Amino acid sequence: MVSRVRVWLNRTYAENVFFMDQLRRNPSDRAVEIHATHGDADSPVLAAADTAELEPEGLSPAGYAEYALAQCRRRGIDVFVPRLHQAAIVAHRAEFEAAGTALLAPPPEAVAVFQDKVIAYEAVQAVGVPVPPWFRVRDADELLAAVEELEAGGHRACFKPASGAGGVGFRMITRSPFSLTHLSGFPTPYVQLDLVLDALRRTDEPVDWLVMPRLEQPEVSVDCLTGPDNRVRLAIGRVKNGRRRGFTLQEQWLEPARLVAEGFGLHHLSNIQFRMFGGTPVLMDVNTRPAGGLHQLSLCGVNVPWLAVRLALGEDPGVVTPPFLGQDYTVVAGPRPLRPVSIPQQRTESEAPLLPAVPAPAQPGPVGTGAVLPL
């Protein structure tokens, strides 16, 4: 058994400070050291790490994979959790394993399926997972035809990039003309159809959008932990309904998530999202990486980041059932200390950290960026 585990998170989102906190507070009482890299010197994940440095800019995916392999060798990384350029990195899994590094990520075939939402929708539909109606559009005429067909069925249309993560590029279509009404209050995701059509007709840049009906709440994000044998070890749904959040083990959400995770070999951590369409849960998106809100499952008495690291190290935790489901909660922002702007100098094994240690907040809810509070 490894006495100390060295984990690297590359250019990840701010909420993963909680992923790091949970690794350090693992129930096995194993020593964990965390390395973090980012393109932003003020990323809170750099401050939360034991060692941290800025990533080089301008690397191609292949060049980044070479950089990552060199990092793992130099830093003695046991487990690498890749987010940036995940597809290029997992294609070199054998080289990372030869360097003594386990990749906490699915195999290349699984990553490839879910990089393109159209390919993903076609694939999951073939294994019996419901998806909403969708149209792939690349120009103004295709967009107008898709919107008119959806509106004829009584649906509001929205669009998002055919490839991409999170809510980047998501917009909802409205036919209301642009007016001063749209300049009052806060900005919204609504865009006027005539303005979008005009922009498409004037641009020389290619677009690749997925147009679909606006899906209804609740949104359920199922966090899955899947072994290399394609069997799900843990699946818990996080329910989002406006500001209110909660948890579910209802099979109407978990069964299709297992079909996706096991059917496509989404090894280690994945996040499979559903919403309602016509009274039926339908697939919205699949993330082949740990979700930003994964730490919220600590409210159910499970430390999923640590379970995933154990699985990556070959220490199979077996099927895990949460001992309870936490109460409903909401998410609020909070302060988090940053490193001095003089970094990225690094401490050696014998040096003290650049910042004083941040005391581990008490369970169940961490305090800091995106902390959870009970309702």
Image: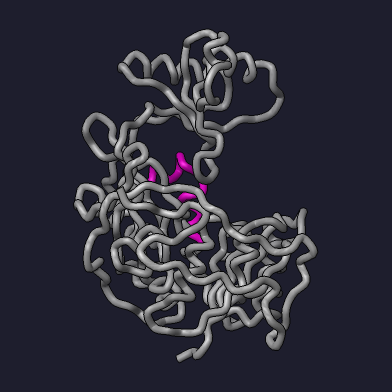
Q: Residue at x 23, y 36 (%)?
A: 280
Q: Position of residue 105 (x, y in %)?
A: 49, 65
Q: Position of residue 332 (x, y in %)?
A: 45, 47
- In the displayed structure, 280 sits above or below 173; it is below
The answer to whether residue 316 is seen in the rendering is yes
Q: Residue at x 53, y 62 (%)?
A: 17
Q: Position of residue 346 (x, y in %)?
A: 74, 75
Is residue 120 within the magenta segment? yes
Is residue 37 within the magenta segment? no
- In the displayed structure, 92 sits above or below 78; it is above
Q: How many marks?
A: 0
* Location of residue 365 by image quarter: bottom left
Region rendered in magenta: 108-123
Question: Which one is in front, 241 or 234?
Answer: 241
Q: Residue reaching furthest right?
A: 342
The answer to whether residue 93 is seen in the rendering is no
Q: Position of residue 294 (x, y in %)?
A: 41, 58
